[in-house]
Image (cartoon, helix red, strand yellow):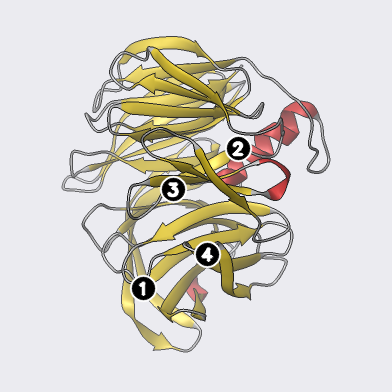
Amino acid sequence: MFCFRTTAFALMLTGCAGITEVDNSFKSSLRMLEPGTMDEIAVIPCVSGASCMLSIPEKLLVVSNTGVLNIYDSETLQLVDSKVIGGSSLSGYRDMVLSPSGNSVFLIGAYSMLIELSLPDCEVLREFSVCTVPHSLAVTSGAPEYLWVTDGFENTVYQVDIDLGQSLCSTSIPDFFQIRLLEPSAYYHNFLLMGSSELLWKLEHREPGLVRLSYEKETLYQSWDAITAIPDDSNFVAVTGDGDSFEIGKLYVSNEWKEKTSCWFIFSDRAAVEGNYWQTEPGNDNKSVYCMGYSGNENTILYRYSYTEPAGLMEEKEFSGFPVDLAIGNSGNLYVLTRE
């Protein structure tokens, strides 16, 4: 759900100054960890250039920037199947999201195209284009259902009709606020949070083609790098900082508006985390969110944060390699994807 990190590492590792479509392979590792303690259960070498993954019932989907999709058994990490879903792309194949119906998966593919894969057979259903440089994806349920796409070049968010694959409307923010991510509310169907380099934004939609974008003034000069909705709850867990130091905490955002350009929020139960390039995923124990980042010296740091009392950081682990993606299985197992 958070492609800023993946794109940044791809460019850093290759020394590129911009997005380049090339065949590029990195050695990758896939770790399976125990929930809670985060003890290592298994580690396997993964498909070269692995760039993102998604957990679905009984399977773990891993896609590489060579356009290869590997399908693993989520309990044993045995390779079940492998498919080619597109051509090679350094900047593509990231940010897989499950459709609201659960019957398909969307992801950013090669050459700025979006791909929809069928489930459970993982065949390519369609490819379509929404914007110049798709940066992150999100989906919202309700009636109707939408796909949301951010454009990293235009700093714009698009509301997309899932059935047609066409944009219904778009809204932009000033260029000096770089969009980081989108995260839908798990409780309300009509709004998403948008993290940016210096502000927290709220995106509200009432009907097709009608989107309202507001920001929280008190979050100015804070970078919102990772946000996760707490399952079956109106609250979130977020990672925010000023570039040098970051905190993780529980984020409450009101569904009511104080004024035209501001939404009321509370950021509480904070704890300092060391690193950057953050990603968060909720555990399935109704109390934990896992937070992964880059701790320096080519190492990945993983924290477990509890959003129930007593709230705060509970465990942390460090692994070799650059962080690529984090997923949680139905059984609660954690999957950590890294690049050497």
The residue labelled by disc 2 is 93
The residue labelled by disc 1 is 190
The amino acid type, in three-letter code, at marker 2 is: Tyr
Between tags 4 and 3, which lies in front? 4
The amino acid type, in three-letter code, at marker 3 is: Glu
222 left or right of 288 in image: right
Image quadrant in which you'd find residue 329:
top left
Q: Position of residue 148 (x, y in %)?
A: 51, 62
275 left or right of 271 in image: right
Between tags 3 and 1, which lies in front? 1
User: Do labels 2 and 4 touch, CB within 8 Å?
Assistant: no
Q: Position of residue 81 (x, y in %)?
A: 45, 19
The residue labelled by disc 4 is 164
Q: CA distance from mark 4 to mark 3?
A: 40 Å
Indicate the secondary structure of the residue bearing disc 3. Answer: strand
Q: CA distance from mark 2 to mark 1?
A: 28 Å
Residues 174 and 75: in front is 75
Q: CA distance from mark 2 to mark 4?
A: 21 Å
Q: Position of residue 283 (x, y in %)?
A: 27, 38
Is residue 129 visible in the rendered image? The answer is yes
The amino acid type, in three-letter code, at marker 1 is: Asn
Above-or-below relation of 197 to 255? above
Residues 148 and 314: in front is 148
340 left or right of 144 in image: right
User: Do labels 4 and 3 touch, CB within 8 Å?
Assistant: no
Dot 2: few (<14), some (14–19), or many (≥20) neighbours within 10 Å? many
User: Do labels 2 and 3 touch, CB within 8 Å?
Assistant: no
Locate the C terminus and report the quarter of the image it occupies: top right
The residue positioned farthest toward the left in the image shown: 309
Is residue 197 visible in the rendered image? The answer is no
Q: Residue at x 49, y 27 (%)?
A: 62
Q: Earlier in the sequence, mark 2 or mark 4?
A: 2
